[in-house]
Every structure is written in structure tokens, then in C-alpha cells.
Image (cartoon, rainbow, N blue to C red):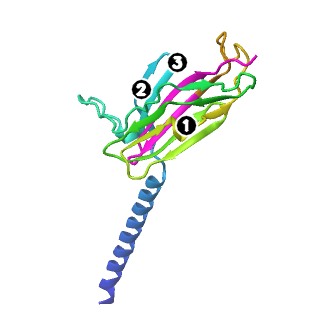
Amino acid sequence: MRKSLIPVLIALFLLGAAFGALAAARGQQASSPPAEVILQSETQGFNTRQVSGPAGSAPAQGSTAPNQPNIGFIDSPTAGCVQPDPAKNECYINWYYMSVDAAPNYMITMTAYLNDFGMIGRYAGFFQTSMYVPFNMNPSGYKVACGADGSGGQPHLGKAYGYAIRARDSANLSSANYGTVYCPPFP
């Protein structure tokens, strides 16, 4: 009876080792972050908007119907720079509003970046399918230097600031909106 038990134990040992190797391989695959691909992009003048997501969310090659992302483009009209006191080299950048929709997914974050300052604003969602940030959530806007006449590359305007607004939803899809805002010149 002992002789017949030894092959069974060896088989169980080998089977357990195979399952352990399979579990380790799956764990390594799950720990690596998914690659991002651009799902949709549009450009108008110097401004570009993009929707990106994990590599698996792109439409398959040869597919006749495109796979539409759930997250929408970020709407951020009328980015402006104002100088409240012409005697000071202090300007304020703000948007009339910023909004994005991801229904049926939930919005996780929306962040605003200025090229010279990095992240200037971060807004978090809480079980909401869209996010709307009006100008009065940042009452005075973001303080920047106005810059000298022509310093942004345009005559009769001050410094130019590039911005990026990024949003991410609960399906790990992201959207981005890029643009440039010019400030009034400071003599």
C-alpha cells in the first residue's frame, strides 16, 4: 500500500508546483500598470483635446464600429487672464467653467496645470457621473506674473501661459484639454 501512495504524493506535489507558478505569473501580470492609448483627439488652432484609456479599450483592428469612450472631452471655455491693478505685475488666470461627463462611469478627479507652476487645482468627485467647476470655486483665479509687452510672442500682450486640464473616471479612462492664455502686458 505504501508503494502506491508515493506516486500519488509526487503527482500532487508537481500539480501544486504548477498551480503556484501559474498564480505567480498571474500576479506579475496584474501588478504591471496598463498602457495608455489615445482613443480620440481633436485640434483647433493651438489647442488640443484628447481622450485616452487603457490599451484594451481601443477598438480592435478590422472592427467596423468604433469603440466610443464613455468619458467626454473637457469643456473649458473662455480661459482668461485679468490684471486688476495696472500698477502691479500681478495677473489672475481663471476659466468661466470646466466640465466633463463620464456617464455611466463616475468622475474621480479633474486637475488643472499651468506650464510654469505645475498642478494649480485638483477637484475630486464623489459618486457623480459629471463634474462642473464654475469660476467662483476659484474666486480670484490663479496669480501669475503679467509679463512685459510681447514677452509671450504676441505684440501688445504679456506673458503666455500654457495650460492642461485632465480628468479621470472610475473606468480609468482619461480626458485632457490643452490651451494657451495670454495676459495683459505690464510696462
Numbered disc 2: secondary structure: strand
Query: In front here: 137 or 180?
Result: 137
Residue holding disc 2: 41
Residue linked to disc 3: 46
Hey, what amino acid is under mark 3?
A: Phe
Q: Circle 1 — which element?
A: strand
Residue at screen point 37% across, 34% down: 72
Q: Quadrant of the N terminus?
A: bottom left
The magenta segment is 163-187
Locate residue 134, reporting x and y percent.
Answer: 48, 37
Between 64 and 8, the one lying in front of the other is: 64
Residue for point 42% across, 42% down: 131
Q: Label 1 vs label 3: CA separation?
A: 18 Å
Q: Earlier in the sequence, mark 1 or mark 3?
A: 3
Q: Residue 126: x percent and y percent?
A: 42, 52
**Residue occupied by mark 1:** 112
User: Does residue 91 appear to the left or right of 54 in the view shown?
Assistant: right
Relative to 142, is 187 on the left or the right?
right
